[in-house]
């Protein structure tokens, strides 16, 4: 997509071990347009956070990108050196993590941290940076921002700290924001406020967002498109309403069936048997076939690529042309 902010092509991340390289992200491709929110969802161990870490160059050894490409606004960034990538982070890519205290230094005032970040990426005076920091905090919904800018992180509640982190991530007006489980540690009412704030700020600024979460409710409220990951691969991707209302891949169907609804009167929720495979024991063929009730011979031996499935794409042999004809 030539107008994409982020374009990831056939990304693979591996971890070197004594017994060979374990592939944790296996051939992931997606694009995110300006102002678009792409939700990335899946069970723990699916490779969601690792994909985000690969995009921003924060994979720790022995992990590394073994192949593929990452393009940001037309510039390839996966081949950049450590210092060049450090300049991209913060200036071109903002980050919001699950625990805001991992992004905030508890020994420094909130304002000092935002001012430092602004001045690291823009040639402005300290007074100008401070006024910009106050404006950002107000935009992020911090009441009395001018008075609270000199507070320490521990003087804010969890929801307010997450608002500060969001302001910190957007202070350099990045092209891309990566939000990794930004609402998990918050109660439901605060979650809704942070979701609404995230959507509003990114729409107004045209920032592309990669929203990583395991919460389908957050995806439904926030994302424009959703990518469902399993065992390091995207198994389904498409418009969020299409994927959530009419899931095509058996794994996505299982995820949706496990969500309780007010309207449903069934006694038991759908349960996906088994567990996510270990990296050292990824099954041949489709990685989901040991847990899939619709698996057939081809699933055991051949790995499916993504193919059209309604308005979405699914990596499932059920949607291959020969399968349709045979059915």
Image (cartoon, rainbow, N blue to C red):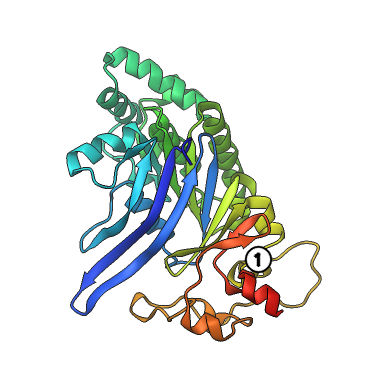
Q: Determine the residue positioned at 21% across, 64% down.
A: 62
Percent position of residue 97, x then y: 40, 48
**Of the pair 252 and 11, the residue shown nearer to us:** 11
**Of the pair 324 and 213, the residue shown nearer to us:** 324
Rendering quarter of residue 264: bottom right
Q: Determine the residue positioned at 18% across, 77% down.
A: 18
Inspect this view and state whether residue 135 appears. yes
Inspect this view and state whether residue 156 appears. no
- Look at the numbered disc 1 and give the secondary structure of its residue: loop
**Of the pair 9 and 252, the residue shown nearer to us:** 9
Percent position of residue 112, x then y: 29, 27
Q: Determine the residue positioned at 43% across, 78% down.
A: 277
Up-down: is 77 above or below 23? above
Percent position of residue 200, x then y: 58, 32
Quadrant holding the C terminus: bottom right
**Of the pair 43 and 135, the residue shown nearer to us:** 43
Answer left or right for 323 relative to 122.
right
Answer left or right for 162 relative to 87.
right
Rendering quarter of residue 307: bottom right
Label 1 crowd bin: few (<14), some (14–19), many (20+), radius 10 Å: many
Q: Determine the residue positioned at 33% across, 47% down.
A: 102
Percent position of residue 4, x then y: 47, 38
Can you identify the residue that label 1 sits on? 248
Up-down: is 289 above or below 86? below
């Amino acid at each position: 997509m030539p107008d994409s902010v982020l374009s990831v092509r056939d990304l693979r991340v591996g971890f070197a071990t004594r017994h060979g390289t374990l592939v944790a992200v296996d051939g992931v491709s997606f694009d995110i347009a300006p102002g678009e929110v792409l939700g990335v969802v899946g069970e723990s161990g699916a490779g969601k956070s690792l994909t985000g870490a690969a995009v921003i160059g924060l994979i720790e050894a022995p992990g590394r990108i073994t192949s593929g490409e990452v393009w940001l606004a037309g510039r390839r960034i996966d081949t950049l050196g450590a210092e060049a990538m450090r300049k991209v982070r913060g200036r071109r890519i903002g980050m919001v993590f699950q625990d805001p205290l991992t992004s905030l230094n508890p020994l420094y005032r909130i304002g000092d941290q935002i001012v430092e970040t602004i001045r690291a990426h823009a040639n402005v005076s300290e007074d100008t940076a401070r006024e910009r920091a106050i404006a950002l905090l107000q935009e992020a919904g911090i009441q009395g921002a001018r008075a609270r800018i000199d507070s320490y992180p521990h003087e804010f509640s969890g929801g307010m700290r997450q608002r500060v982190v969001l302001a910190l991530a957007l202070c350099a007006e990045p092209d891309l924001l990566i939000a990794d489980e930004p609402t998990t540690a918050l109660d439901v009412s605060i979650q809704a406020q942070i979701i609404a704030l995230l959507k509003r700020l990114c729409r107004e600024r045209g920032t592309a967002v990669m929203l990583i979460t395991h919460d389908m409710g957050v995806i439904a409220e926030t994302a424009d498109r959703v990518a469902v990951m399993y065992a390091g691969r995207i198994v389904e991707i498409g418009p969020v309403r299409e994927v959530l209302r009419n899931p095509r891949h058996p794994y996505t169907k299982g995820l949706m069936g496990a969500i309780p609804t007010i309207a449903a009167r069934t006694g038991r929720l759908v349960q996906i048997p088994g567990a996510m495979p270990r990296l050292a024991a990824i099954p041949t063929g489709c990685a989901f076939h040991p847990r899939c009730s619709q698996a057939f011979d081809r699933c055991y031996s051949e790995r499916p690529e993504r193919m059209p499935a309604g308005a979405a794409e699914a990596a499932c042999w059920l949607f291959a042309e020969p399968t349709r004809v045979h059915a």
